[in-house]
């Protein structure tokens, strides 16, 4: 039986890895298009990541300000980090929250996955919500510099409206937060290590 999207699917004919860096790999493939012609596709292979939406007891949200070299400026974003090979998603989220912010959470909820650059990357970012936060010590990676800040949901919404909050993963997390608080997108909270 033919796939229902057969008229849209591109088939890989051949390919090469053209660059392999610390954690990104660049691939160049030749593909057969649905109409039989051939074309080329270049894309980034990424191991995947997690993002955490830390909810403080007073309703504010914990975020980071970090210089992002490709953008040439400091960006506002929720804590996030790369998955290590074979790492459990929740374990990665717990590790990243602790390392980057020093906070630990007693409850965790997995929201879903987002694909932020589907035209040129296979990266998937898994979204977690964390609450019941207690503060500890940060353990930043060597060469990692960031500033912790808090904002209300309304402040983030205003920053997004003004075009000052532009990080795609953080904007999607803000949408998810608003839909959850409105009762439209439920979260299944689970106990996590504090």
Image (cartoon, rainbow, N blue to C red):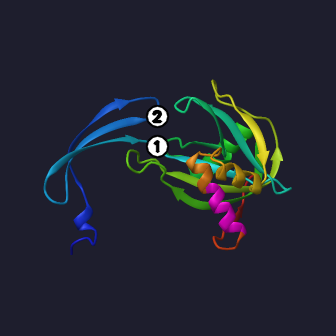
Kindly tell me whether residue 194 is visible in this rendering: no
Q: Which residues are magenta?
A: 173-181
Q: Residue at x 24, y 56 (%)?
A: 10
* Residue 17 image point, x, y percent: 30, 35
The quarter of the rendered structure image containing the N terminus is bottom left
In the current view of this chain or complex, which residue is farthest to the top?
Answer: 143
* Residue 30 image point, x, y percent: 20, 44
**Camera-side residue of 61 and 167:** 167
Identify residue for label 2: 23
Instruction: Give the quadrant of residue 145.
Output: top right
Q: Residue at x 65, y 44 (%)?
A: 164
Q: Which of the two discs, 2 and 1, labels the residue nearer the N terminus?
A: 2
Label 2 crowding class (10 Å Cα cut-off): few <14, some 14-19, many 20+?
few
Query: Mark 1: which secondary structure?
Result: loop
| Marker disc for residue 47 | 1
149 relative position to 116: left or right:
right
Q: Check the image and report above or below for 142 versus 94.
A: above
In contact (CB < 8 Å): disc 2 and disc 1: yes
């Amino acid at each position: 039986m033919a796939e229902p999207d057969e008229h849209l699917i591109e088939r890989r004919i051949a390919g090469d890895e053209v660059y392999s860096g610390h954690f990104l790999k660049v691939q160049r493939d030749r593909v057969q298009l649905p109409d039989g012609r051939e074309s080329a596709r270049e894309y980034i292979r990424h191991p995947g990541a997690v993002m955490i939406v830390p909810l403080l007891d007073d309703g504010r949200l914990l975020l980071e300000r970090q210089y992002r070299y490709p953008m040439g400026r400091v960006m506002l974003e929720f804590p996030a980090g790369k998955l290590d090979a074979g790492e459990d998603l929740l374990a990665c989220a717990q590790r990243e929250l602790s390392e980057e912010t020093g906070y630990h959470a007693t409850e965790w909820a997995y929201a879903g996955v987002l694909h932020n650059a589907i035209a040129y990357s296979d990266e998937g970012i898994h979204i977690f919500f964390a609450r019941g936060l207690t503060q500890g010590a940060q353990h930043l990676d060597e060469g990692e510099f960031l500033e912790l800040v808090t904002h209300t949901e309304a402040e983030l919404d205003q920053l997004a409206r003004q075009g000052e909050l532009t990080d795609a993963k953080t904007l999607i997390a803000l949408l998810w937060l608003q839909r959850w608080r409105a009762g439209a997108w439920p979260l299944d909270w689970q106990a996590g290590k504090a």
